[in-house]
Amino acid sequence: MTGTITGADGRTRFQTTVARVTGHQLFWPVVALVVLLLACGIVSPGFLDVTVRDGHLFGQPVDILRQSATPLLLAIGMCLVIATGGIDLSVGAVMAISLAVSLTYIAESGTGSNLSTALTGLFLGLVVALAIGVFNGFLVTVLGIQPFIATLILMIAGRGIAMLVTKGQITTVTSPPFKSIGSGFVLGIPTPVIIAGGVFVLVALLVRRTALGMLLESIGINREASRLAGVKSRNITWFVYILCGLLAGLAGIVYGAPTMAADSNNIGLMKELDAIMVVVLGGTKLDGGKFSLAGTIVGALILTTLERAVVIFHLPTQVTPLFKALVLIVVCVAGSERLRGKLKIRRTSRPVVAAEVAA
Amino acid sequence: MSIKRKRSWLAGSVAALAALSLAACSGGSSGSDDDSTSGGGSGDLIKVGFSQLGAESGWRTANTDSVKAAFTKENGFDLTFVDAQQKQENQIKAIRDFIDQGVDVIAFSPVVETGWDQVLQEAKDAEIPVILVDRTVKTTVDDPFATYIGSDFEKEGDTAAQWVKTNSPDAKIFELQGTLGASAQVDREKAFDAVMGDNIIGKASGNFTRAEGKAATEAALQAYPDMTMIFSHNDDMALGAIEAIEAAGKTPGKDIQIVSIDGVKDGLQALHDKKINYVVECNPVYGDQIADLAKKIVAGDTVEKKTIVTDQAFDQTITQDTIDARKY
């Protein structure tokens, strides 16, 4: 019976499918990502090649995946915080603090080549990140400080704390096991990709297989109404700030591990804005409520590919920010529901994407 | 910039936990941050007030250490050292304090170029000679300072370029730029490009950091497959580049040569390990040179208006002893 229906109005069905696909919040971000990757492949033949070297995957797409791990980890936490209608500006500074704590511990211990030392360092870094998450969540939920202000405190002061830990120096250590967190491979796949992928799956299961995701959205849409309906909005909100802090710490360690240098001034600098951008690119609105975790993957990949494309396209460094801005504007404009409603015909927005290839 | 560079560990690690979130905000009261090495009969010691701009990098810390090591009692100095924590008002306050104390010489690294007119005039009225360290000022005051001492970024870029010109004149160079607009980036690039400009096939910024230097190099290896050399504006980015090159299955220093500027310990170690080919030093250890200038000025000798710190350059013949002697 189903077969006959498909046959009868297959065309209409096709059209509805097309409309549904193009209307999906992730459609334009995905198009942008694919176009960017293809453009890189055309400009620089071999860009899309993935080979196996020394028993692990190697190639530009692998590098992109590996580098996307940091923004993805940040964005997953940020996405949940934003879903509750909040924001966490401290994640960049938390990256610096966690890395500083981990590397300082390893440096002080003097036994960096031991696996146990590296693991303890990792653990300490994460514990500090967790504590910061608890602190942020406390300010926001218990004291009722606006998230923007509450997390701004650590965004500004956090680097001071990281400096305190490293005594104002750039702490460098040698610890192969710790280094492998950022630059190693598991079954041929870069470790950061495994870590970020694993975290993504866990968080996705947590919010989508339990009621947590729905509760988060309800808090984001109307905190008071949710509370009156029996949602423990305080605990849930607190939890997402803790998770966000923890993931930021993990991101800092994954980001800083390959170079083994706790540069408190620069690790995670402006990364909070990258994370917010990744979340927004992924189709989550900043005013809270509905969120898209899958979107963070697309957003993180776009961000990383963009940074790489700048070099691949041989663009002068001075125009890099302009190029990034152009692509992001195009993605946002193309994804604007209001604009599409006004234009009615999909066709009209195509040339916009074509222009991006030229850029 | 000033926010992220802030540091207040001097405030005491005991208070650290209590002041957790406010640690870096407390810079306002930093005049109290005196690290005075004075104490007791100064006799015929030369009283020096030194206002350092902050401690934003390993380079600056090494600079501070060398100043403290040079202005000792044994060398005939009574040093009052104040860390300005990246704030001009702290520096102005410190300089006024120096004037009130009637020091013999004031030395400082100005955190910004402008806004010094009044305080420099006050120092001049008090007839206290001023030594500018590392950075210079723009002022309407006539003859505002006795002398300036610092590094010459252009000369560093030129030294690097001359080595390349002599040793690999046909190199196809990819230039890893520092943070765009920083004087170290602008001047090093200008001088290097003036000599080797025709050989440069591409440029990208790594913002002076290892991680971004690595990312930029990964992309550059794909974008410029015929590259044979990387010129990096600092050692950190060069170290990141080494990782990217090794990951791509090439040998840094051989398949792709690396020329870098700074001379920090890690960079020199990589040079010794034959992963970098040439390092031009940006020397922070010139406290003794400042001390010499101070002595001459107080003795009434004439000194040059400008002293450029001698930067060494190292190739792969560097010895492990030289590296181990590095403190930064």
Image (tube, rainbow, N blue to C red):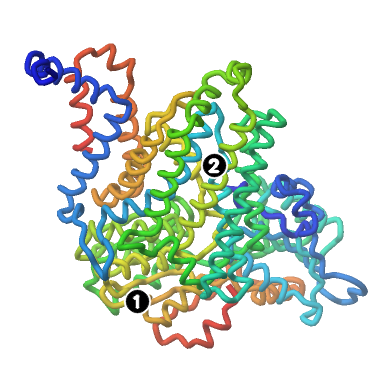
The amino acid type, in three-letter code, at marker 2 is Cys
Picture residue at 76% right of the left edge, 72% below the top? B298
Residue annotated with mark 2: A244
Q: Are marks 1 and 2 on the same chain?
A: no
| Residue in the foreground of this view, choosing between A113 and B282 | A113
* Disc 2, SS: helix
Q: Residue furthest front?
A: A1
Q: Residue furthest right?
A: B41
Q: Residue B186's x, y, as percent?
A: 43, 56
Q: Chain of mark 2?
A: A
Picture residue at 40% right of the left edge, 63% below the top? A183
Residue annotated with mark 1: B163
Q: Residue B160's x, y, as percent?
A: 38, 72
Q: Is residue B186 visible?
A: no
Image quarter for residue A231? Answer: top right
The answer for how far apart the CA atoms under marks 1 and 2 are is 49 Å
Q: Residue A24's x, y, as percent?
A: 29, 25
| Residue in the foreground of this view, choosing between A354 and B73 | A354
Q: Residues within 10 Å of mark 1 (few under 14, many from 20)?
A: some
